[in-house]
Image (cartoon, rainbow, N blue to C red):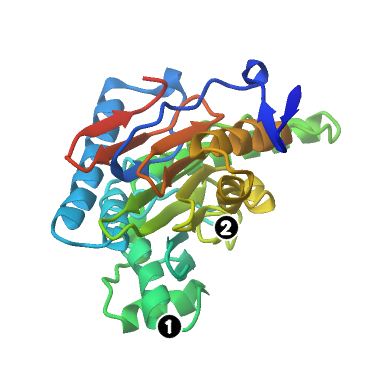
Amino acid sequence: MSRILFSGMVLITMANLSQAADPVFNDVVLGIHGGIGVDKKDMTPELEKDVRAGLRSALEAGHAKLKGGGTSLDAVEAAIRVMEDLPVFNAGKGAVFTNAGTNELDASIMEGKTKKAGAVAGVMTVKNPISGARAVMEKSKHVLLIGPGADAFAKQQGLEIVPPSYFSTEHRRKAIEEIWKREEEAKKRRSEAGDIPLELPKKKSEYGTVGAVSLDSAGNLAAGTSTGGMTNKMAGRVGDSPIIGAGTYADNDAAAISCTGHGEFFIRYSVSHEIVAQIKYRAVTAAAAADDVINRQLKDAGGEGAAIVLDRTGKFTSAYNSEGLYRGCITRDGKIHVHVYED
């Protein structure tokens, strides 16, 4: 890929990059994403209607918190809770299944003033994992709690607890059963072909996440991310969503970031922190930093995914190297923008 070195900064020529970068929206107080979504060929009018409605509801809930004097943390938590409760997204109700047939959820939240953060991973009974993450941040001396310990802590804090079956939906159950069937068929063909490796084709719906970024009237940024992870992931697998600096980061001197996609790549490349670092130390715009990390670094490594970015001045954008990204934002005066693909 060609590069031009100028005044100590690397400028990326756009010819070799995906054009999957949004315009910059100004005076934004809340931005969200609902994952990279399904391929266009798999999108139905009904699904698109539900996705758009869900994004709008999440933006309205978060904006209401800000209008009522709430903080950016309040807005992020409120927006994500809405998406966690909607089965159309892969977080909370409707989370994907592991290879063991369980639903294991991850979430994190961070504020940009003091850089306090909290996260949970592998929880199975917390109705709203984002609230569990905030409880870890505010009610414990830790940043990350996992598994049964995280579930127990959430219960101790009075958060709503549900049976593991609450997260299961027919749609997700059918998806995992289809994958198991394909795996068995692949094993049979591999055995018949003499152990020739056969790789199952991936679907975009196998992984997804929801997230939010916000800027409040005090100038404080916050970010949060919540997910059910990758369909058919190993039980116990943790992706980037609860990892501060990978899937979530907020810094009042730069921006708030929430990511979605193939988590292993986001962890290895410290994607959310890398975007913030470029803004702070290369003095590039949030849009340029996100585009470089998502559409150059990550794409060149073979990692698929996206990031939404809200900078300290209220400029919001997203970058993605997938076919689409469920995303939206709302301005200070309440104007809503919602997009699914490059619309």
Q: Quadrant of residue 309?
A: top left
| Residue at the farthest left position | 68
> In the rendering, at what x and y percent does residue 136 appear?
42, 75
Residue 1 appears in the picture as rendered? no
Give the class, few, some or many, for how many residues have Cα within 10 Å of label 1's Cα (few <14, many ≥20): few
Q: Secondary structure at mark 2?
A: loop
- Most extreme residue toward the top is 15
What type is the residue that disc 2 sits on?
Gly
In this rendering, the label closer to the viewer, 2 or 1: 2
**CA gap, disc 2 and disc 1:** 20 Å
Q: Amino acid at mark 1?
A: Ser
* Quadrant (top left, top right, bottom left, bottom right) of the C terminus: top left
Residue 6 image offset from top left, x and y in percent: 71, 30
Q: Residue 40: give its label.
A: none
Q: Position of residue 337 (x, y in %)?
A: 27, 31
Q: Residue at x 58, y 22 (%)?
A: 18
The residue labelled by disc 2 is 245
Structural crowding at the residue carrying mark 2, measured as other residues with C-alpha within 10 Å and reported as few (<14), some (14–19) or many (≥20): many
Q: Earlier in the sequence, mark 2 or mark 1?
A: 1
The residue that label 1 is drawn on is: 140
